[in-house]
Image (cartoon, rainbow, N blue to C red):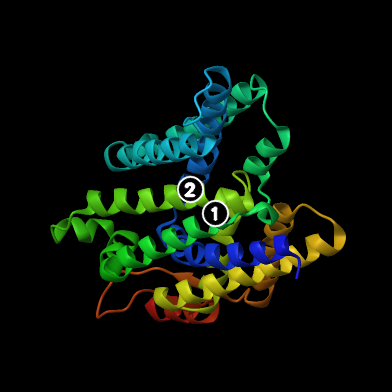
Amino acid sequence: MNPFLQMALFASLAASIANGVIGSYIVVKRIVFISGSIAHAVIGGIGLFAFMQSYFDWPWCTPFLGAMIFAIFSGFLIGWIHLHHKQREDTVIAAIWSFGMSMGVIFLSMTPTNQSEIISFLFGNILWASLNDIYALLALDAIILLLVLPLHRRFLAICFDEKQAYLQKQPVQFYYFLLLTLVSITVVLLIQVIGAILVIAMLSLPAAIANIFTKKLSRMILLSSIFSALFSLIGMFISFELDWPPGATISLTATVAYLLSLTLKQTSYTIPVKLTGGSECTRLSEQEASSTESHKTP
């Protein structure tokens, strides 16, 4: 097997675990737009640190470090706005989104660097995945699993009923910021695979497809990881055969699969409800929902 293709295969399998876990929480919490803002704010960090590395000759000032700092900072800023100024949350998210993109484009235009490296940050190239990238993804998977397994029900509480969690005197702010931190770190590491612009597709679409077919979040996480790995493998095969960009092809594969799943399951939808009796969410078909409404009508 081609060594580049072999490394890409390992990277996609390692990334699918983080995709499945974090992507599922993103979908059920309905913070896809927040995750997109973080992903685009990362471009500002990449451009600024690439410029400083080139202009000041600072070898430690890498685009990866800039992406990580900007991702965590923007995640905390959005989280603080969400908890204290919800009426302005969408405006702040849009501002961070546009600021990161604009700042990144300006600094990248002034940076005399390898354009192929910049393109890989923006659109990804899984075929360039190195052994260090795979180790970083595996380390992220381990961190996510070590945190999520004992805190799963806490995350469920803030995802499905944040107000009820406040009434139960749970540290909602701590868990919400922890979740945003995991989202930020996941976004940065997945940039190596799918790129900053397309990373939000791989975080949200496999989980959204899994949510169509299951009503349990634990099963949704498992299905999302499987779908993510499957889309990556299919996308890499298509890109290899047709000589298409790998990141864009993987994203396109996930999008087509999502549209097909909506067509196949157009009579079903998922309704998140409060956590009662250990249930995580309830999936009702349109037929059942209309039947329920008819029983309520005198």
Along the line of sight, which residue is nearer the eye, 256 or 242? 242
- Image mark count: 2
Q: Secondary structure at mark 2?
A: helix
User: Dot 1 lies on which element?
Assistant: helix
Query: Which mark is drawn over residue 133?
Result: 1
Residue type at numbered disc 2: Ser
Q: Position of residue 161 (x, y in %)?
A: 29, 61
Image position of 29 (left or right of 224) = left
In the rendered view of the protein, which quadrant contains the N terminus? bottom right
Between residue 175 and residue 114, name the one nearer to us: 114
Residues packed near mark 1 inside 10 Å, few (<14), some (14 to 19) or many (20 plus): many
Q: Residue 85: horizontal and vertical position, in percent?
A: 31, 36
Q: Quadrant of residue 208?
A: bottom right
Question: In the figure, 34 relative to 236: above or below?
Answer: above
- Residue pictured at 60% horizontal, 70% vertical: 229
Out of 19 and 37, give the one closest to the viewer.
19
Residue where numbered disc 2 is placed: 35
Residue 258 visible? The answer is: no
Residue type pointed to by label 1: Asp
Quick one: label 2 or label 1, which is nearer the N terminus?
2
Q: Position of residue 69 (x, y in %)?
A: 41, 36
Question: From the viewer's perspective, is 296 left or right of 204?
Answer: left
State the CA–CA distance, disc 2 to disc 1: 21 Å
Q: Are marks 2 and 1 in contact (CB under 8 Å)?
A: no
* Number of other residues with Cα within 10 Å of mark 2, as a class: few under 14, some 14 to 19, many 20 or more: many
